[in-house]
């Protein structure tokens, strides 16, 4: 039924396009991605595998359609379909078909509306454009790892597929995007998001939280669907002294869950409490070019919602147990995230492209209070932990008439006094104008216990992908 509702707006737009437009721009992509573990790690923190075991397999079909209904009204729609060759079954159930005969377990298949919106130029005024629908609204000037790009949640699920096309990718959201052009170089933007935003989490995330020697239960606070619980953003952009400048404000929620409570009322179970707190983010982003060197910078001041965390534990007093509850502020003050970077092409052969960025604060990191750190164990070097610093860089060089691209990228993580390095070498070959073949690896070195990426040091991966654009 869900897929039927997804197809209804697409059929409506297709019908309108045939009625009002003689030209429809169809495009898309077919892509096969597969990764294989080249190391053995039977007791890993996040992955358990043997050498030569597949890490991830997926076939992706991307269909896009764009056109104009009139001179001032245009539309865009994109569907993503995913399938895999592995059947879904366990030792106690055969892979059965759906009630209508579709092979859902033998041939797992998913369909989603990635984007779908209508854009109205000169809405009520020649200087105003309005875009309505599910859309990707990017703020900031950095390369992928922006700190002011707050309107769209991170695709945390695909982050762990290690598909290079989805690194730090963000998900489009349903929004009203109003753009008022003050001049040829200045624009004011108002975005109203009709609900809270939540990042998709990897499959098995909840099960992992519940795993352990003690039975656990999870409680998630959910906001009611009220107008006051919707999110919005404002941005003013202009050009000054050959520098692109953007000032932004976002009022919304954290896109990833925040642990704020433990309750162990008996020795047999633990209750975990999570919520998606509110936050206000004030941002500035800059970009320009000096002597053929491109540069960019972003600074975000995050002011989190005032809330408390708690731990409840039973304490033996004589022959009885008493419940002791300790409460601490989860966040005490606002905090800053920033990124600064640049790129340059060195005149060697066809040109050696260099891109480097210094990041303070990954997308999952926050500045907790000292008391919350001590109570819950929040620290640097862990996912959903304290703010760290990173150096993110890559170099690219093309040969064979620029059909073969050799790349080496990496992330250096600075967690307290320890570091981890995440290497990403790859080869990309353009076999035909619309056919790309890519292979590469993900290799991590560093401390496994006290660094975020160091925990993957025994999860070395090689990947292969082929994509055809049409």
Image (spheres, rainbow, N blue to C red):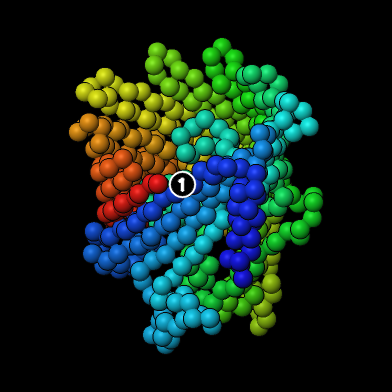
Left or right position of 348 against 31:
left
Q: Which residue is mark 1?
A: 27
Q: Position of residue 82 (x, y in %)?
A: 44, 61
Say which residue appears at 39% left-offset and 35% top-offset. Answer: 391
Residue 454 seen:
no
- Left-right relation of 192 to 67: right
Under circle 1, the secondary element is: strand
Q: Splitting the image into 4 quarters, where does residue 151 fall?
A: top right
Q: Residue at x 64, y 75 (%)?
A: 265
Q: Is residue 212 above or below residue 394?
A: below
Horizontal relation, residue 139 to residue 391: left or right: right
Kindly give the residue lying farthest to the bottom in the view shown: 92
The answer to whether 380 is drawn above or below residue 161 in the figure is above
Tally the numbered discs: 1
**Where does the image place residue 438, in percent across and percent down from the top left?**
28, 47
Residue at 78% of width from left, 32% of height from top? 124
Q: Judge left or right: residue 447 versus residue 80.
A: left
Mark 1 surroundings within 10 Å by alpha-carbon count, few (fewer than 14), some (14 through 19), many (20 or more): few
Front-most of residues 316 and 132: 132
Q: Is residue 104 above or below residue 8?
A: below
Q: Nearer the viewer, residue 470 or 223?
A: 470
Across and down, in percent, residue 46 comes to 40, 62
- The N terminus lies in which quarter of the figure? bottom right
Q: Is residue 436 visible?
A: yes
The residue located at (29%, 21%) in the rendering is 346
Q: Quadrant of residue 126?
A: top right
Residue 236 percent location from the top left of the image: 67, 27
């Amino acid at each position: 039924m869900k897929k039927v509702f997804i197809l209804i707006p697409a059929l409506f737009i297709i019908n309108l396009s045939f009625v009002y437009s003689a030209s429809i721009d169809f495009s898309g992509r077919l892509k096969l991605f597969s990764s294989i573990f080249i190391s053995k790690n039977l007791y890993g923190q996040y992955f358990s595998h043997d050498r030569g075991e597949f890490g991830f397999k997926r076939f992706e079909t991307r269909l896009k359609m764009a056109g104009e209904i009139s001179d001032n009204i245009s539309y865009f729609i994109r569907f993503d379909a995913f399938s895999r060759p592995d059947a879904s079954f366990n030792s106690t159930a055969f892979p059965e078909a759906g009630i209508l005969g579709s092979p859902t377990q033998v041939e797992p298949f998913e369909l989603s509306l990635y984007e779908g919106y209508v854009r109205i130029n000169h809405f009520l005024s020649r200087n105003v454009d309005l875009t309505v629908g599910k859309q990707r609204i990017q703020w900031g000037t950095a390369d992928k790892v922006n700190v002011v790009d707050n309107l769209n949640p991170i695709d945390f699920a695909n982050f762990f597929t290690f598909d290079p096309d989805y690194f730090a990718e963000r998900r489009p959201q349903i929004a009203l995007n109003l753009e008022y052009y003050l001049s040829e170089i200045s624009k004011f933007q108002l975005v109203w998001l009709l609900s809270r935003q939540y990042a998709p989490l990897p499959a098995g995330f909840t099960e992992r939280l519940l795993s352990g020697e003690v039975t656990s239960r999870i409680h998630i606070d959910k906001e009611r669907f009220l107008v006051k619980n919707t999110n919005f953003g404002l941005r003013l952009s202009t050009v000054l002294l050959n520098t692109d400048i953007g000032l932004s404000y976002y009022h919304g929620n954290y896109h990833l869950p925040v642990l704020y409570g433990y309750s162990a009322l008996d020795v047999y179970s633990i209750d975990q409490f999570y919520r998606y707190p509110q936050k206000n983010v004030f941002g500035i982003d800059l970009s320009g070019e000096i002597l053929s060197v491109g540069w960019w910078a972003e600074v975000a001041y995050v002011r989190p919602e005032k809330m408390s965390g708690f731990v409840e534990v039973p304490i033996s007093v004589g022959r009885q147990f008493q419940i002791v509850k300790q409460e601490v502020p989860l966040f005490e003050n606002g905090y800053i995230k920033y990124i600064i970077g640049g790129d340059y092409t060195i005149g060697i052969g066809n040109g050696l492209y260099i891109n480097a960025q210094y990041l303070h604060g990954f997308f999952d990191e926050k500045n907790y209070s000292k008391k919350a750190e001590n109570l819950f164990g929040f620290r640097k070097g862990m996912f959903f932990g304290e703010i760290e610093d990173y150096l993110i860089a890559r170099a690219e060089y093309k040969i064979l008439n620029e059909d073969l691209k050799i790349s080496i990228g990496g992330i250096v993580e600075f967690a307290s006094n320890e570091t981890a390095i995440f290497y990403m070498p790859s080869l990309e070959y353009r076999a035909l104008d619309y056919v790309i073949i890519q292979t590469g690896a993900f290799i991590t070195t560093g401390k496994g216990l006290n660094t975020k990426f160091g925990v993957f040091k025994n999860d070395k991966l090689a990947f292969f992908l082929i994509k055809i654009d049409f």
